[in-house]
Amino acid sequence: MLGISPDTPSAQARFKAKHNLPFTLLCDVDKKVADTYGVFKEKNMYGKKVMGIVRSTFLIGADGKIEKIFSNVKAAGHAAEVLSVLN
């Protein structure tokens, strides 16, 4: 399991420590990975159109192929949703 965000390494380190995350976080400050995976999109925030990351989860098989995409996810309940697909 990996997490990827456009945050800086120091911001990610604080987030990882705060939430006691047991997995690796990768930095995508230039948003190349987000753009490649199609998750850097125009969003509507408080009535304004802005570019941002659409929180998403990708299940990638041992062969490197994407098996399932969860788009526009909310943190609450998402881990259980992913686990139900894996089981």
Image (cartoon, rainbow, N blue to C red):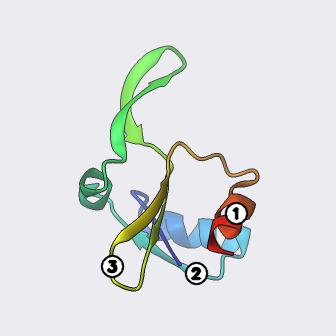
Question: In what quadrant of the picture does the C terminus appear?
Answer: bottom right
Secondary structure of the residue carrying tag 2 is loop
* Of labels 3 and 1, the one closer to you: 3
Residue farthest toward the bottom in the current orientation of the protein: 62
Q: Nearer the viewer, residue 8 or 56?
A: 56
Mark pair 3, 2: CA separation? 19 Å
Residue at image mark 3? 64
Q: Secondary structure at mark 1?
A: helix
Residue that carries the numbered disc 1 in the rendered image: 79
- Sort mark 3 into few (<14), some (14-19) or many (20+) by Cα contacts within 10 Å: few
Residue 23: mark: 2
Q: Residue at x 76, y 53 (%)?
A: 77
Q: Amino acid at mark 2?
A: Phe
Residue depicted at 32% across the width and 59% down the height:
29
> The residue under label 3 is which amino acid type?
Gly
Above or below, 86 against 55 in this view is: below
Q: Mark 3 or mark 1: which comes first in sequence?
A: 3
Q: CA distance from mark 2 to mark 1?
A: 14 Å
- Give how far apart the Cα atoms at labels 3 and 1 are: 21 Å
Whether 37 is drawn above or below 74: the answer is below
Left or right side of 76 for 26: left
Please provide percent x and percent y for residue 71.
50, 46
51 left or right, relative to 74 = left
**Disc 1 marks which amino acid?**
Ala
Q: In this orientation, which residue lies closer to the viewer: 66 or 55?
A: 66
Q: Nearer the viewer, mark 2 or mark 1?
A: 1
At which x and y percent is residue 4? 44, 65
> Which of the marked residues, 3 or 2, is nearer the chain's N terminus?
2
